[in-house]
Amino acid sequence: MLMQGRRKVAYRNERGNLYVLYIGFAAMIVVAWNLYAQVGLSFIVNYRSKCALEAASLAAARDLSRIVIDDPKWGYVALTDQPPVGDDTRAGDGFPLPVTGINTIMATVRLEMLVAQSLGTNEAIDCAMDDLRTARAASRRLSKTLRNSLKRERRTGADDKELVARDINGKVVRPMDSAAVVYRQNADQMLSGMGWTLESMNAELGSLTQEGTTNTPSPECGLSTRVASVFEPELKNYPAFVDVPAAGESFYFAGLGKQASLVEPALFDASHTAQNSSVIRLIAQLKNKNNTGWMKSVACALPAFMEDRVPASYMVLRFPNGIPTGTESLRSLLTSDGLSKRIPLYTACGGDFPVDQGAQLKENPDTASATVRQAVNRAFFDWLRTAHAKPKLDAVINALDCQFNRHQPSVTYLYTFDDCGEIEVAAPKDYPFFAQTAYESQLYTVASNVINLQGVAWSMRLRDQVHRIGKQEGGKHAGQPMPSTVAVNLNQAEEKRLLATAGSRYDRSRLGLELEISTPIMTNGGEL
């Protein structure tokens, strides 16, 4: 009876619950795997795109180094110095012209400012300030051309013709086209297989938030308090992207490396457009084929530099009738109050005077007349400009203060700079520059009894063969110094003087400036 009264207890089967749990875990694993796969795929796509974009930025940076502009005051200008070998950079004499880097130009003008400050005359300061003004204009013109070359959509109007970027052979340079080709070669096949495509690629030019490097030599050590705190005291080259002031003026230099190199994108700075910008930043925008995702890659690169190997020219001072009293040094000659008379200024037109048929000496188009001191200072700074950034400041100052008769009495003194920036002064017995030619479009003057020193009037003759630079204003030789018929600098082998391709551009025996003071006449009881 008792057994019959018991109820049977029903137990639920738990295996069904486990199946549900297994399905849930499987779903979670699938979701996690899918997320992991998506993250991993995105990482691979981003990494491959960044590598391809870095290669593209290097290609674009190399193209930026090739771009050359024709400046009316400085001739051919680029980010870096380039040798005289271009087919499209030939002067009227048939030989190619060297390309001057914008850093070389700014360093040259900065040296002029320091020398002018040492001389302390209004004439010297005016010359340096004139060159600073034209250098900044060249910098702006180059920057505008570089930025225009990075635009994917190009206008072809007449107003934009001068902004078309070209190299020394006249070929159009398109950095973004080069970048796009390199990017596709490195990424297109892989990205398309993963369902991604390149939607857009844009570029901009800028600087860095920290100091960069250049190959432009500094004329003095300890450039400034700010720079010295970061760089070594014995600084050999200018720093880039920081102000290196001189005589109250700011000077900025573009960053350049030994070769095109990558820089950290986080250091890129696009805010200082007035400076010499050289860093290119590429931004690539990727799109998923299903329009379900976007991705951005960024890369920055720095262009490379080339060495400036064009030598300095010679400045010749001639005293056929002896050195005038009161002008015992170059500094006293440039600052003397006895050089206050006004003289006419001339320019050779229609060719080299008097060797080219039809060539004539005409009134100088810029300034018809000037004081002797103004003319001499302008010619001195024109000659100093041919040495570019090579001279050391103390070498220039020593040359200014060196007494003419200290080494040996002579009627001729030759000044030039070696590749280390040191001044070379020679006093030869024979005059090496026999040809009395005034180059086309360059400065020439001759005047009698215009230098009054201690009761004696002296005549002068001045040939400034490097007054105007470039094809636009510099005549058939474009402001290049005049080669000598005989070797003046014996450190150069004769067979290397006049090269077939570059002509006399690498010749070290070239005349930039000749100043002759002669024919003294007594006035006011002066003594000869």
Image (cartoon, rainbow, N blue to C red):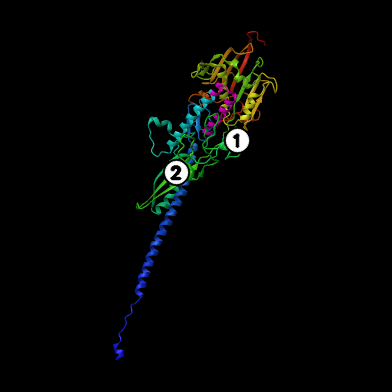
Which quadrant would the N terminus be assigned to in this image? bottom left
Give the structural element (helix, strand or loop) at label 2.
strand
Which quadrant would the C terminus be assigned to in this image? top right
Q: How many marks?
A: 2
Disc 2: which residue: 282
Determine contact: label 2, label 1, CB under 8 Å: no
Q: Nearer the viewer, residue 270 or 205?
A: 270
Viewed as shown, does residue 272 lie left or right of 328?
left
Specify the segment rendered in magenta. Answer: 100-125
Question: Where residue 286 sits: x, y (%)?
Answer: 40, 49
CA gap, disc 2 to disc 1? 35 Å
Query: How crowded is the residue under tag 1: few (<14 C-alpha within 10 Å), some, or many (20+)?
Result: some
Reply above or below: 373 against 64: above
Residue at position x 31%, y 84% in the image = 8
Indicate which disc, 2 or 1, sits on the residue closer to the N terminus. 1
Give residue 37's quadrant in the image.
bottom left
Give the structural element (helix, strand or loop) at label 1.
loop
**From this viewpoint, is residue 488 visible?**
no
Question: Where residue 437 sits: x, y (%)?
Answer: 57, 19
Q: Of the residues tagged 2 and 1, which is closer to the observer? A: 1
Question: Where residue 384 sits: x, y (%)?
Answer: 58, 26
**From this viewpoint, is residue 117 visible?**
yes
Q: Is residue 403 magenta?
A: no
Residue 222, label in figure: 1
Question: Where residue 22 sits: x, y (%)?
Answer: 38, 69
Three-letter code for the amino acid on which mark 1 is drawn: Gly
Viewed as shown, does residue 19 lie left or right of 129?
left
Reply above or below: 126 against 309: above
Q: Nearer the viewer, residue 67 or 457?
A: 457
Three-letter code for the amino acid on which mark 2 is drawn: Leu
